[in-house]
Image: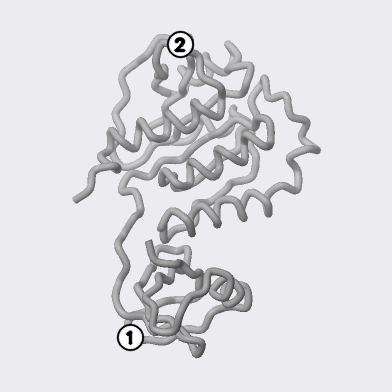
Amino acid sequence: MRHRFFIDADLAADTTVALSRDEQHHARVVRVRDGEEVEVFNGRGAAFVAKYSENGLQLLKTAPDREARTAIHLAMSIINLDKFDVVLQKATELGVRSIIPVVADRVEIRAERYRGKAERWRKIVFEAVKQSGRSVIPIIEEPQPFDEIVKRDGAKIVFDADAEATSSEIRDAAILFIGPEGGWSERELQLAREHGCAFERLGIRRLRAETAAIVATALVAARAGEFLID
């Protein structure tokens, strides 16, 4: 894949854009050469192949669209923060549209430990977007209680190792719920049933929360055909 650069601006073919100071530094680090073709994206869906020079980037043509057609929103319970970082990175690579940190009944991380992490989380997601070739930066919502998120409209799937699986149908979008290390409480499972959630298992083995998040996201994306190459 070509080297990729972020431009926080509207982009259009046959125009020339300048790199920010940070991206100029990145270009020097990776040793981009004059005349080399690179990619430029704005994080809002626009991406172009461009010709690099020290005077700016000449946008040549639209870059391949690598965004998922199905809007997967990952409602991830807050877990060990290092492992939560991994989930952010891998879910972004797999094409999620947004990530919703969930405050579940059995979350073991104290609130003061994840307050103020928003900037770090955004940086992890941004770097994963840049690496994976995406053109849209997923939204990271503020941490919210499970009780509020489960009330949202649309397709919702709760992944649980012990719940009886039910049928689920995803058309254009879905929210995937992944529980904390201690699993969902009975109260939460009942609330999910009351609000029309489907239930699924991830095989015969019990997965760690971070593994479950990655597998569930990949599974739903695969069902939607996101891994097929046209």
Q: What residue type is labelled 2?
A: Ala
Name the spot of residue 144 as percent of width and height, x first.
63, 37
Q: Nearer the viewer, residue 209 or 178?
A: 209
Point out the residue furthest to the bottom here: 55
- Disc 2 and disc 1: Cα gap in Å? 55 Å
- Provide the secondary structure element on which disc 2 rests: loop
The answer to which of 1 and 117 lies nearer the viewer is 1
Quadrant of residue 115 within the rendered picture = top right
Which one is earlier in the sequence, the residue at label 2 or at label 1? 1
Residue 181 left/right relative to 204: right
Residue on which disc 2 sits: 163
Image position of 44 (left or right of 220): right
103 in relation to 99, above or below: above
* Whether label 2 touches label 1, CB < 8 Å: no
Give the amino acid at mark 1. Asp
Q: Rate crowding at label 2 as few (under 14), some (14 to 19) or many (20 or more) other CA atoms within 10 Å.
A: few
Q: In this view, does 4 lie to the left or right of 122?
A: left
Q: Mark 1 points at which residue?
A: 14
Query: Which residue corresponds to the image point at 80% horizontal and 38% vertical from the top-left?
Result: 112
State the image coordinates of residue 136 (x, y, percent, origin top left): 44, 58
Q: Which residue: 63% across, 49% down?
A: 121
